[in-house]
Image (cartoon, rainbow, N blue to C red):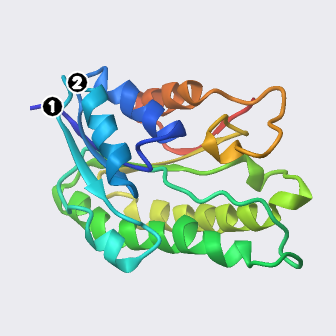
Amino acid sequence: MNRHVLITGATRGIGRACLTYFAGRRWAVTAVARTANDLEKLAAAFPATEITTVVADLGTADGVAAVPTLTYDLILLNAAAFVPGRLLTGDSDVFEDQWRMNVLGNHRLARRLLPRLVSKGRGHLVVIGSLGTDYWPAHLTAYVATKYALRGLFAGWQKELADTGVLTTLVAPGATLTSSWDGEVPPPNILPPGRVAEIVGQVVERETEGRVVIEP
């Protein structure tokens, strides 16, 4: 039987690159994203891959509840909101907007999906964090604050999953060229999504745990 990976935010950027990586190695994929049309195009682009698509806004409780609780071999928590902005100024509260997906959504997903892996006694949780929690420009403070919180959640998951047979890894890439950068000027040494996917694949195949940093 093919190994089975759940990928959130699967239609773009790092998520799509990871799907390409695992599909190329004949994994079955459950692909989660907000837009049905994007998921349909994704499935059509990989006709030889066993892909189950799930339309879900993971920033909502209903969206999280739509994700199937199966015995995945790998859970890849990749989906994230990215909105530049400061904490103390601006017309909208970009921290609150990103908190719902980047922190609360992942927290809810972990509570929904991980007990099944624990009961099975094996599996791998890979979380896409950010090198931004080490250094960042001022206008990304709100985004990075949510990634700090996600990093804290990961530390908690890591402790609670110790000795259960479920591996835990936080992959922290530097700036990566995805659609999140639309309207922004990307740095000259920005990472391609495929590079991040390669590292994720290596982490899984080598059963690497802990925090893995990907420098630009």
For the N terminus, give its image quadrant: top left
Task: Provide the residue designation for mark 2.
Answer: 26
Mark 1 touches mark 2? (CB < 8 Å): yes
Residue under the point 31% across and 58% down:
55
Query: Label 1: which residue?
Result: 2
Q: Which mark is residue 60?
A: none
Q: Nearer the viewer, residue 213 or 137?
A: 137
The relative height of residue 66 versus residue 62 in the rendered view (above or below) is above
Query: Is 180 positioned to the left or the right of 63 in the image?
Result: right
Whether residue 145 sits left or right of residue 211 in the image: it is right
What is the C-alpha distance between the residues marked 1 and 2? 7 Å
Question: Which SS class for mark 2?
Answer: loop
* Along the line of sight, the residue nearer the viewer: 106 or 205: 106
Quarter the C terminus occupies: top right
Dot 1: element: loop
* Image-based side of 179 in relation to 50, left or right: right
Q: Is residue 144 left or right of residue 153?
A: right
At 46% across and 66% down in the image, what residue appears?
106
Front-lying residue, 84 or 123:
84
Q: Position of residue 186 (x, y in %)?
A: 80, 36
Q: Is residue 6 visible?
A: no
- Graded by Cα atoms within 10 Å as few (under 14), some (14 to 19) or many (20 or more), the crowding at tag 1 reads few
In the image, residue 72 lies at what x, y percent? 23, 49
Q: Residue at x 62, y 61 (%)?
A: 151
Q: Given the image, on which type of amino acid does mark 2 rest?
A: Arg
Amino acid type shown at disc 1: Asn
